Amino acid sequence: MTEELTVEQMAARLKEADDILILCHKNPDGDTMGCGAALYHALCSLGKTAAVLCSDPVPPNFGYMDMKLYDGSFQPATVVAADVASLQLFGEKNHVPELAHHVDFCIDHHAGNGGYADYTLLDETAAATAELMAQVIEAMQVPFSPVIADCLYTALATDTGCFKFSSTTARTHTTAAKLIEAGARIGQLNKILFDTVPRERMDAERMALDHLEYYLDGRCALIYLTREEIAESKVDPADLEDLTGLPLRVAGVQIGITLRQQPSGSYRISIRTAEGVDACAIARCLGGGGHNRAAGCELEGNLENTKNAILAEAEKELSRSLEGQ
C-alpha cells in the first residue's frame, strides 16, 4: 500500500535523496520523457547523481532534452517513476524489470495508478504529470532553466494535444506561461512535436487510413496496422503515437480505436472518445486503463478476434452513455 505525499513532501524527500534512478514508461511519450528529463536536470542542479532509464529507446526527436541515460555507473539508492501508472508499463527490456522491482517514489496523474511505489504524488485532475513535476521542482527551490522549461513544456503540450484536449485547465495554461517565461522555445518545440513527421510516419498513416472502418452506425471508427505494414513502412514505433487521434476526427464519431500489432503478434489498442463517453471504462474491461477520454490496452489473438472484443465493449459504453443523457 502506497503512502500519498503532498507536493512539498515529495520535494523534501527528493532533496534528501541521492544516486537517483528515474524510470519512464515503455513506448515513451512526451510526458514521461519530459518529466523524467526535467527531474534529472533539477536533481543535477542540486549536486545529485541521477540518470534516466526507459525500456524502449528514447525517440530521437527528444534529443534536445539532453538527459543522461542510465549506464550502470552508479548503484541506485532511490528509484523514482515519472508518469507510470502501473508496474506492467515499465516494460521488459533494458534491464528495467530488475531495477523496477522496488520503486520508492511515483509522480503521476493517472486515475488508475496501481499504488505500487512506497510513496506517491498523484493528482488525476492534472492534464499531464508535467503539471505536478513543475510544482515539485519549484518546491525543491530549483529555478526553471531553459532546458527544464523545454522538457516540461514538451510534457505538457504533448499530453494535452497542444492544449486542445478537454483535460486542459487554467492551471495547465498557468504552468505553460511559467515555462515560456523561463525560456521554453515554444516555436521550435511545437514544430518538432506537432508539425514535422518523418516520411516513414506518413507512409504508416496512409496504410492505417486505408484500413479505416466504421461501426455502430458510424459512431465508432477504427484503423489498424499489422506488424508487416509497420515493418514495411520502416517507421519508428514511437512515431505512431499520434495516429491514435485520427479516427475521432471524423464527424459523428464518438469512439476512435487504433490497433497496432506488436512484434509478438498481440495488438496494442488505443481508444479516444468524445465528451460523455468513457474510454477508460472500455479499456478497463479488457485489462487496460487510462483517462476518461484517452485509454488503452493490449490483447492477444488475431485481428478479427481483437476487433470483436474491443467493439463489444465500445458498444456497451455507447449504450451506457446514451442512457445517461
Image (cartoon, rainbow, N blue to C red):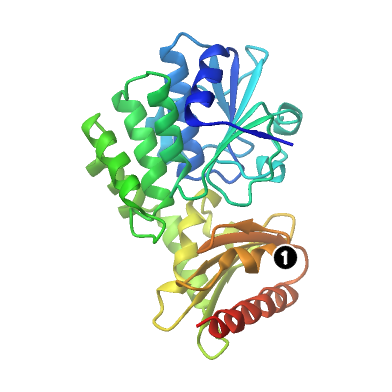
Residue 285 location, quadrant: bottom right
Question: Residue 57: x percent and y percent?
Answer: 57, 37
Vertical comparison of 80 with 219: above or below:
above
Question: Residue 213: x percent and y percent?
Answer: 54, 82
Query: How many discs appear?
Result: 1
Question: Residue 49: x percent and y percent?
Answer: 54, 12
Residue 207 seen:
yes
Vertical comparison of 183 with 319: above or below:
above
Residue at position x 28%, y 48% from top? 191
Question: Residue 320: x percent and y percent?
Answer: 60, 80
Between 227 and 134, which is closer to the camera in this rendering? 134
Residue at position x 53%, y 26% from top? 10
Residue at position x 51%, y 40% from top? 32
Vertical comparison of 98 with 245: above or below:
above
Position of 77 compared to 37: left or right? right
The residue labelled by disc 1 is: 286
Vertical comparison of 83 with 320: above or below:
above
Residue 204 seen:
no
The residue lying furthest to the top in this view is 47
**Mark 1: which amino acid?**
Leu
SS class of the residue under badge 1? loop
Position of 17 compared to 183: left or right? right
Residues packed near mark 1 inside 10 Å, few (<14), some (14 to 19) or many (20 plus): some
- Quick one: quadrant of the N terminus? top right
Residue 270 location, quadrant: bottom right
